[in-house]
Image: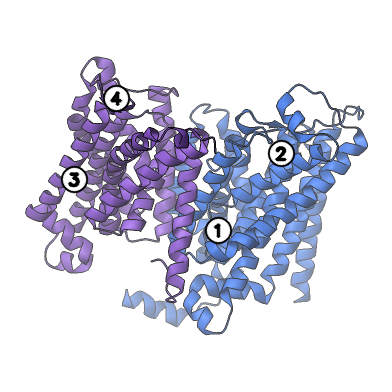
Chain colours: A purple, B blue
Amino acid sequence: MDLLIFQAPILIVQASLDGILIGILFALIAYGMALQWGVMNIINIAQGDLVILGGYIAYTMYLVGIHPGWGVIVSPIIMYFVGYGLYKLVINKVVDRDLFISILATFGIAIVMQQLMNFIFGADVVVAQSEYGTTMLFDNSVTLPNSKIFAAVISVIYAIALVIYMKKSKLGRAIRATAQNARAAKILGVDTEKVYAATFGINAALCGVAGALIAITLTLHPYVGLPYTVRSFMIVIVAGLGNLPAVAISGMGLGLFEEFADYILGTEFRIGAVFMLLVFILVYRRFKLSKKREYLK
Amino acid sequence: MNKVKQKDLILYSGLIILGLAAPFLFSAFKVQLTYLCVLIILAMTWNLQGGEMGYNSFGNILFYGLGMYLTASVQVGMFFPLAEWTESGGEKTFVHTTAQYFQGIGVGLLVAAIVPTLVAGAIGYAILGLRGHYFAICTLGLGIAAGEIAGGIEIIGAGQGFTTPPFPAEIVDPEARGKFFYFLSFFVLVLAFIFVKYIYDSRFRLILNAIRDNEDKAEAMGIQTMKYKIVGWMCSAFFCGLAGGIMGGLIGYIDSTDVAFDGREMGVFMVLMAILGGKGTLWGPIIGATLFHFFKEGLWTFILGWQYVALGVLIVVIVVYFPEGLMGWLREKYPDRFGEVIDEKDRKAQVEIK
């Protein structure tokens, strides 16, 4: 094999580090998806586009002259209201209905969002320069952008903050109660409509954080939302709903897979490999469950 | 009974005459009419497993794109080296003679029908074991993965695209190309309609409906659901492949993600058209596709640039407010026209319970 990665083993270290750091970011998006899937029983195809929109908010700050790193605070606040508005506009009509309807409806939202972002921000690939510099490891053979470390740290902080919020706050308790049994929660006086709106808002806010981090670590483009949706969907079905450590681990696993696929198959097959992995995971789970005469629910 | 049959006969012969006369009546719109035929084929066959079987696939675009690439590859590969053809891109170094062109497209369409059907059969066992939304997402992934992978394969043009053989220059009549593709697609449409109609009157449809309504119970009744699900999917794949082959020849240029595996347009259109007309009805997808095409062509030019926004809004509105579609709405309004007998007493009782 004349692949670069086998000739220079140090690249394995490079790919692993990149994979793990990016994987943490994926896990954050997946956590948002698991949250609203578990609470509202909706699969949100527009998840990735919310991420990209969050990224464009940070990019706009960068254009205006504010450091894009502040995007991790501004972007979730704006995105919370975007999510809240989306819920009031469309999502509240598809809760409690066939999952296929929610898939198609959010698919429609995704198309609208992609096109509007294309109008507003243009179809170019953009990146917000954070100028955090890079760290060199192992005799300068492994380069590690500091922005990726920053992204991983911020992701972990937000995830832990959310876990604590869900455990301690009143709204967090209401969200967990609704996830367990919406009807019982309603009887006990939880305003489920409010809970749903807040959940979708929190999900969008998490997407906003992830998007702002993607804006400084990776690149933004109006049409790359769907791969992020698929990645988070994949992580959720591997890890299960509401299992945060598993979400983090499978997120990192996915990041590693992608970096290695990038080196071994070539960059042009990277997205293809992600989508094929989704198919393989689903088919694998299906065969495993069919031995027990069950199916994915 | 006889009377109904006679009425149907008049309807069908009227539609066929209209179809045959259309390219002469509206000769400026031949390409649009071909497009319409292909859209109807796609919607009708999507409905077979989406509406009747309850397996909402976003991945039929896989068979469509496969058919498109196969037709073009066979058409070129039969007479010339394929790699050199795609490498030369738009610059034509090879020219098909008239006979070669038609032989090529004939064999190409045959391959384009058979291979996707076999692919559907081969992956069917694995994929159709998934249910509901997992199936939908899995097929969505499959369609996009196919586009991404096709965009990386050199021999079929990779990212720069694949120019299909141009219509033979020896045929001087400028109308000939449009007519050829129109009648080809119309022929496939008639074929597809006869096939779907045959399925609608058969036991096979009842089995598919049983799978849709409750798969576990259907299995408990002794139906080998997996077998029927695979056959149902293969039926869709057959016509999707043909439709793709025709579209490839008509458009004249194949791009991996924007023309062939175009999940963002065709892949969504076929689902949307079937839902707009009414899932699980014979005429619903046909009416839905026609309406959709008129709407699209009529409106697209006025809202240039905003068409995808309009498309997205349309999807949301249709899905959220008219999930039953046009036929479902008519059915609710005039149930007796659909052969449903409503017991007045029963209905009143239900209203009182509400």
Amino acid residing under circle 1: Gly
Callout 4 and callout 3 share a chain: yes
Could you tell me which secondary element the residue under label 4 belongs to?
loop
Using the image as rendered, state which of residue B220 and residue B273 is in the foreground: B220
Residue tagged 2: B248
Could you tell me which secondary element the residue under label 3 belongs to?
helix
Instruction: Report the chain holding disc 2.
Output: B
Mark 2 is surrounded, within 10 Å at the Cα level, by few (under 14), some (14 to 19) or many (20 or more) other residues, namely many
Residue tagged 3: A159
Mark 3 is surrounded, within 10 Å at the Cα level, by few (under 14), some (14 to 19) or many (20 or more) other residues, namely many
- How far is the residue under mark 3 from the one under mark 1? 43 Å
Q: Dividing the image into 4 quarters, which one contains the N terminus of chain B?
A: bottom right
Residues under numbered marks 4 and 3 in contact, where contact means CB atoms less than 8 Å apart: no
Instruction: Report the chain holding disc 3.
Output: A
Could you tell me which secondary element the residue under label 2 belongs to?
helix
Q: Is residue B265 visible?
A: no
The furthest residue to the bottom: B221
Amino acid residing under circle 2: Gly
Select label 4 or label 2 by which is in front. 4
Using the image as rendered, state which of residue A286 and residue B244 is in the foreground: A286
Answer with left or right where residue B11 lies relative to residue B258.
right
Q: Dividing the image into 4 quarters, which one contains the C terminus of chain B?
A: bottom left
Residue tagged 4: A139
Which numbered disc, 4 or 3, marks the residue that appears first in the sequence?
A: 4
Callout 2 and callout 3 share a chain: no
Residue A146 picture location, percent across and down: 24, 27
